[in-house]
Image (spheres, coloured by chain):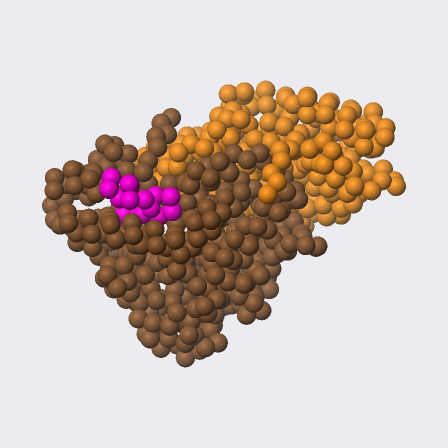
Chain colours: A orange, B brown
Amino acid sequence: MPLSDRVLMGPGPSNLYPEVVAALTHPMLGHLDPDFLSVLDETCVRLRTAFATTNALTLPLSGTGSAGMEAAFVNFVRPGDAVVVGVNGVFGERMVEVAGRHGADVVRVDAPWGSPLDPAAVLAAHPAPALIALVHAETSTGVRNDIEPVGAGKGDALLVVDTVTSLGGIPVEVDGWGVDVAYSGTQKCLGVPPGLAPLTVSDRARERLVERPSSWYLDLNLIAGYVASGTGRTYHHTAPVSMVTALHAGLGVLLEEGLVASWERHRACGTLLQDGLERLGLELVAPVSHRLPQLTTVRVPDGVDEAAVRSRLREGFGIEIGAGAGQLAGKVWRIGCMGHTARPRNVALVLAALGEVLGR
Amino acid sequence: MPLSDRVLMGPGPSNLYPEVVAALTHPMLGHLDPDFLSVLDETCVRLRTAFATTNALTLPLSGTGSAGMEAAFVNFVRPGDAVVVGVNGVFGERMVEVAGRHGADVVRVDAPWGSPLDPAAVLAAHPAPALIALVHAETSTGVRNDIEPVGAGKGDALLVVDTVTSLGGIPVEVDGWGVDVAYSGTQKCLGVPPGLAPLTVSDRARERLVERPSSWYLDLNLIAGYVASGTGRTYHHTAPVSMVTALHAGLGVLLEEGLVASWERHRACGTLLQDGLERLGLELVAPVSHRLPQLTTVRVPDGVDEAAVRSRLREGFGIEIGAGAGQLAGKVWRIGCMGHTARPRNVALVLAALGEVLGR
């Protein structure tokens, strides 16, 4: 069974921080062991720092980022609730689908794929929605959506934000922006394997938790009883011990570097990469004002077999870049530069390899 | 942050096979990388062998065993469906709760905690249920429930079986017993960290999948598109790559040893442990006819502080044993001997340590 190593420059997973690899091999502990519970508690503390929040209910959920999305809807949407969803990519579309399954009356606000959402249009879409949901960093297009103006104008609505690709890579200010529920993934800018969904819930949102949501596994009323430190901790399900330990380590790397320094490293690598791609004569999809540094979407030049280019990068250079998704399938490549992958060395490598494969 | 090693003799997680620890550190691969997809495909092949099934839809679900339980109900229960659930412990109770949340009209068939379910009573509970659900190995009581007679008499009902604590430790015969949906966990007799739920679905059950279940994350119609090997594999969510690689390795250890040899090792260790506990004058909860070898429930002697005993085992010997749960909280200890932990060395150790702590 071949298991070669890769320079992971797709839309995630990214390469793991060495400290995360080491953490994965820590001796297994019981999910109720005091030593593990202190790792879990410290993970929650570190997540609060990463999310820039004081929310008590901040925790790693036992599923991937998509489980985070599902938790954000199943715990807060009651049948018939008006839910405004901004849609300018795959993950906005997914929010529409997930909210709909939980009985929401979805009001969608579209922007062209590759353009940012218009916050004013989001706010004007419904006079009094129960919930407004936005993707901060659209992994399918490389576009950043503005969250702060929606938080400022949300009124009584709860604001749910997908920070899967943004957390650790660009500023995320949960409390500062008035975000009520944010979820993320571990395999993007945190440099941790996929498998957990960091999640934070404001006290205001907590008062509106659905009492007995259809999902038992993602029921935050019950999960809160396990992650609550101190007395009265109750068993819900067996925590994914190794993954939590890995996240603890990844957040340790992030906070030791410092959030601002991590954002700056992602910014610098993104700029290097994007300048280099343009020097190769390639066209970037996202407008410079709302272009993510950590995930760059590049148009496939006319006449180029996009899948063949990805294969040659993988087989010849051990580099993974991503294909397009949704409306952009076949039309773009997605080049990630996230977490431990966000190093000038990797940018230089992918530019050199791409230049060689494209003959430019 | 202390992270001591432990001899894990609670109800799970158990200690990891060394091959699993090694697999956790394999270089990260993309979730659509051909090398990873071949690991995933082989994991599904190995799961079929472990479950003794030819079911095409056999896969590791991206959540813990409880996510497996939720998937078993959310994908097959339609509102108002009659669902018969056997209840003789925490996990039967959990099935009642999960099925109820998905709209089932639950008919419960109880047996005292510590006794097995009566298959005839389960079959007589409803004339034509849509679904019958049973826990094979009740982790809260150490009791094995008989599955085969229910499979033989199930009629048109789908038979759902929780094999979280049984898979790899005692015979599980999905096809032979007429089980339609079985799910398991990775952290018990498979010697893998918690975080995935092996799941298998019969072709007959597959025809009855709910078309658009409330859960998007656990929607087997969609997940099947990703795990289907060959052409037309579609992205659903980012697979938990490291955990799947770990499960692949754990199943490799299991199948190299052989299922029959693994069952025999668990049986032999269980007998050693249970004989030793009785020699210490302790009383076992489960009747010998339906006593699990891999998870033994022992009554706490009168006048003994059960939590203090567990603390002394943990702090003095680095051994974890489990507390009681549900009705048996405070009344029993649960001693697991599962996966890599199921070795005579560990049995000798826990008996010696327990004898010393109890002064017997």
Q: Residue at x 16, y 37 (%)?
A: B356
**A337 up-or-down from B192: above or below:** above
Q: Nearer the viewer, residue A44 or B191?
A: B191
Q: Locate residue A217, reporting x and y percent.
A: 45, 51
Q: Residue at x 45, y 68 (%)?
A: B176
Q: Nearer the viewer, residue A49 or A314?
A: A314
Q: Residue at x 45, y 33 (%)?
A: A25
Q: Is residue A110 left or right of residue B171?
A: right
Q: Locate residue B34, reporting x and y percent.
A: 66, 44
Quadrant (top left/top right/bottom left/bottom right) for the N terminus of chain A: top right
Q: Nearer the viewer, residue A309 or A66?
A: A309
Total numbered labels: 0
Q: Residue at x 39, y 50 (%)?
A: B189
Q: Locate residue B92, reporting x and y percent.
A: 35, 61
**B53 up-or-down from A116: above or below:** below
**A224 up-or-down from B149: above or below:** above
Q: In this orientation, does residue A357 appear?
A: yes
Q: Can you tell which quarter of the image residue B123 is in?
A: bottom left
The segment highlighted magenta reads B334-350
Q: Is residue B338 left or right of residue B253?
A: left
